[in-house]
Image (cartoon, helix red, strand yellow):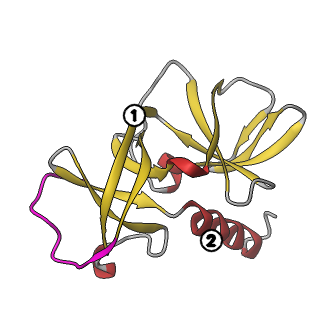
Amino acid sequence: MKKSSAPKSTKTQERTTDILICEIGKELFGIEASLVKIVTEFSELDPGVIIEPYIGSIALSDTKIPLINLAQFFQLNSTDHQNKHTAVIVSFNDKDFYSVVISNIIGITQVKVFHKIPEQGLLYKNVYKSLFSYQETFLLLLDLQTLFDKIVEQEQLKGHL
């Protein structure tokens, strides 16, 4: 997101949360760090990875984990890292695991104030939890659980799952 003044929306909560700042395409987003279980790199040529066109799977320790390439899903310009990608493996219940392809990890920041997002400005509703301030701009906090649920539902309707 571009630099701007504080959003006109109201604050939603005031608790300190660790947020993983990551680059997807050439844009920055946030992921709740407490959801992240593993970060791994892989090559497009790895036979254990399938991405068609934005959904697929990655094999880790003989387990297939659903994988989403968010740059392709959000139709963002990708950054080329010599066919190398980073997968962030997350879990919402410490039992089921999901993987998100990102371009780069920027770091972890602590966020205390989150802002509601005006829905009329969103292309993809319900896949963002909130906005938060980061280095004189505002970033979107991804709602990965809703995102995975919506994509699975969408792919089931298309008959792909």
Contact, mark 1 vs mark 2 (Cβ under 8 Å)? no
Q: Is residue 6 left or right of residue 94?
A: left
The crowding category of the residue bearing disc 1, from other C-alpha atoms within 10 Å (few below 14, some 14 to 19, many at least 20), is: few
Which residue: 48% across, 75% down? 126
Nearer-the-camera pick, 136 or 23: 136
Residue 139, image x and y in percent? 30, 55
Residue 16, image x and y in percent? 38, 56
User: In this rendering, does residue 84 appear at all?
Assistant: yes
Which residue: 80% across, 33% down? 60
Q: Is residue 68 left or right of residue 46?
A: left
Q: Is residue 79 left or right of residue 118?
A: right
As helix, strand or loop, the secondary structure at mark 1 comes to strand
Q: Is residue 143 above or below residue 39?
A: below
- The residue identified by callout 2 is 150
Which residue: 79% across, 55% down? 96
Residue 58, image x and y in percent? 75, 38
Give the residue at the far right of this rendering.
62
Residue 88, image x and y in percent? 60, 40
Quarter location, residue 161: bottom right
The three-letter amino acid code for the residue at tag 2 is Lys
- The residue identified by callout 1 is 107
The three-letter amino acid code for the residue at tag 1 is Gly
Which residue: 52% across, 50% down? 70
Quarter location, residue 95: bottom right
User: In this rendering, does residue 117 appear at all?
Assistant: no
**Range of the magenta residues?**
1-13
As helix, strand or loop, the secondary structure at mark 2 comes to helix
Nearer-the-camera pick, 20 or 88: 20
Give the residue at the far top of this rendering.
82
Q: Is residue 24 above or below residue 9?
A: above
Look at the image and say whether residue 106 sits in the magenta stretch. no
